[in-house]
Amino acid sequence: MRKRAILITGASGEVGHALIRRLAEDGNNVLLTLDLHELPADLARLTTHVVGNLLDTHLLTRLVSEYEIDVIFHLAALLSTRSEITPEMAHEVNVEGTLGLLKLAAEQSQWRNQSIQFMFPSSIAVYGMPDRESKQLFARVREFEWNQPRTMYGCNKLYCEMLGCYYSRHYRQLAAQQPVTIDFRCVRFPGLLSAFTLPSGGTSDYGPEMIHAAARGEAYACFVREEARIPFMAMPDAVAALLDLARAPREKLTRQVYNVGAFSLSAAQIRDRVMAVFPDAAIRFVPDLKREAIVDSWPADIDDSAARMDWGWSPQYDVNRAFDEYLFPNVRQRYVQPA
């Protein structure tokens, strides 16, 4: 008999680590995780982990033969900076990988005659502000505004949002087969700040890179100018947003894609906070014009009022708590030398 399970792809990433810990707190959850990399030992014991490629259709077929998948948290993705270096690979991983999982969810829905929930983390990279003046003028951007991404990663994420909406609303609409029921839900994250995993190539990673470099006692050259501003969120709130949206009653939701936010900071404001805790930190600004242009195309802040009204979204970590209680103590502890 197949086990019922929650599938998490991209489980070895920043969000995956935190999500595994939170879901494992409920002893009734059976977790199945998939990634190209092994999990740390403390996480591996909480899940059945499979090392493999999301694009391996034979592997997915084997997993479906062994598990009844009720919920999918699809975290696997090639992040923004790497996606610009290898855009064709980014399309393959980000789009083809998502499409394959949506098809898997559709098949599960038809076989079992029940809805399969599909949770998808998107990104502020789906937005494309044309210039700095527009970014200043439109200070807080809603879900349906400025959806003209300028990066492959942003294009991938926006298209996958649309694929999810299509598969949940219109897939096989002209066919005679039993209709598919995929409960697709998506959160658009701002820049995420994690204390427990190293930055992994995101264009918003100048924030956490600054903190980690200071804690290691290394100099850091920030690749955006001091005034560059985007919204950020502490990792515990990112995981809470995914879980809160997953738990929300379907009838309460007025859309399938939601902005979620916490606070907005300039690069200089992050530097100032880091210097207050690590006064010997050597931080300078050496803008990389191409990477900075990507950051400039993202909103200075986002409007998450729909999430707040529909499912009660409210971040627990404001800017002070995010830095003073979560980031600084935990990042500092990471680099403490054993006695």
Image: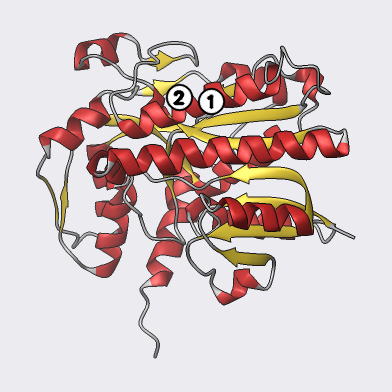
Residue named by callout 1: 161
Residues tagged 2 and 1 counted as in contact (Cβ below 8 A): yes
Residue named by callout 2: 158
Query: Residue 231 sits in which quadrant?
Result: top left
Frontmost residue, 279 versus 103: 103
What's under tag 2, amino acid-wise? Answer: Leu
User: Quadrant location of the C terminus?
Assistant: bottom left
Query: Residue 89 sits in which quadrant?
Result: top left
| Residue in view at x 74 percent, y 37 percent | 107
What's under tag 1, amino acid-wise? Answer: Glu
Other-residue count near label 2 (Cα within 10 Å), few / some / many at <14 / 14–19 / ≥20: many
Q: Residue furthest front?
A: 176
For label 2, the SS is helix
| Residue in view at x 48 percent, y 66 percent | 37
- Using the image, determine if residue 109 lies above or below residue 75: above
The reply to whether residue 250 is visible in this rendering is yes
Specify the color scheme. secondary structure
- Residue 273's disc is none
